[in-house]
Image (spheres, helix red, strand yellow):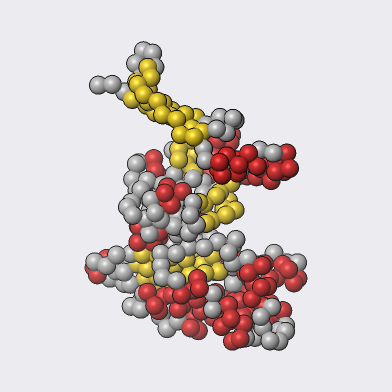
Amino acid sequence: MPEYYIGIMSGTSLDGIDTALVEMADTPTLVDFHYTPFSTDLRKSLTTYCQPNHLTLTRTLGQLDSHLGELYATSVNMLLAKAQLSSHNIQAIGCHGQTIHHAPDIPHPFSMQLGNPNIIAELTNITTVADFRRRDIAAGGQGAPLVPYFHEAIFQHPKENRVIVNIGGIANITILPSQQSGSVSSGFDTGPGNTLLDQWIYKTKQQPYDQSGLWAQSGHPQPEIINLLKSDPFFTQAPPKSSGREYFSLTWLTDKLKRLEKNYAPEDIQASLTMLTASTIVEAIEAYAPDTERIFICGGGTYNATLLENIRALQLCPTDSTSALGINPSHVEAIAFAWLAKRCIDKKPGNLTTATGATHPVILGAIYQK
């Protein structure tokens, strides 16, 4: 039985793609070949980013990619020293990377994460799984949220309808009907989590975040602000849907605030942003999981007391952190990517299609051998 491999190369001439069908025996033998020329527009775009005046951006991205890879590897090695384990004890690392742009709804959709997994594998001597989102996007999905499948595996209850709320920069929910119901789990991004809160307090007070929500607590939520922000079409868009801080940015916020008829105190804006996060989470649950019996919250937003108070005030069912389920809310996502790495190594799907909208389940992640 012949062993066929395909090789693809597009070189620095930027003219097109060489694709070779090769039979591998004692000596590689070319079976067939195809050449696909680049369009004029594509060649022009590629040429532009190879010019000296564009090298600053690409060099910066490349260096950030390497720097983050080094930092991730250092973090792994420090963890191993703390746990008194050797790299030989570890089957694989699952590294999500640092998202710098998530754009699943454009003509050529993508999600870009930095943190070179080659460096991680090299500096730790551990097989590394990375690039989790792009296969789901290739299968027609949003590439996010990816944690709902893990939530289902760990947090679904035999009899209780649950929702897991993850409040990071962006907030997302995982709807977990009870196992006995036979209903399908699902999930989606609800909108901004901490990102606008962090960006606004940094712009106004040069503080990285609103500790415990104390600054928001000193202000008063303003219906005019909240309603204006909620008029954004993202909030009425039906799932599956996902977003990122490149959408819910400081520019997005300041452009909206310019439309207000009066100026509000900065703390009132912070209070309004905190209520925006809370109310869009609760409204998403009411719209898509009205039978929810209990809510569990994880992510950094768990430590914003004002945000949690707002959620509890708007939501009738009991609300706790995932600590009540035995997992520290700060640890859930890192555990999830270890789990997704194992799914990849075991050649098992890692996406929940009812959360991402992909056309079929796919194995997530690319493997970088040690």
Which x, y percent locates residue 266?
72, 79
Q: Is residue 296 visible?
A: no
Side of 181 where 213 appears, left or right:
right
Count of marks placed on residues: 0
Which residue is at 57% across, 33% downward? 14
- Residue drawn at x 51%, y 79% is 279
| Whole-percent x, y for residue 40 in the image | 56, 41
Query: Is 279 left or right of 304, judged from the image as shown?
Result: left
- Image location (x, y in percent) of residue 265: 72, 83
Residue 268, horizontal then vertical, whole percent:
67, 82
Residue 346 vertical position relative to residue 245 in the rendered view, above or below: above
* Image position of 222 with respect to 44: above or below: below
**Quadrant housing residue 287:** bottom left
Q: Nearer the viewer, residue 278 or 227?
A: 227
Q: Residue at x 75, y 71 (%)?
A: 205
Which of these two is toward me, 332 or 254? 254
Tell me if residue 348 can be seen: yes
In the image, farthest residue toward the top: 26
Compared with residue 26, is residue 227 higher up or lower down, i.e. above or below?
below
Residue situated in front as seen by the camera: 8 or 164: 8
* Residue at the farthest front position: 40
Quarter of the rendering occupied by the N terminus: top left
Q: Residue at x 65, y 42 (%)?
A: 48
Left or right, 110 with respect to 286, comes to right
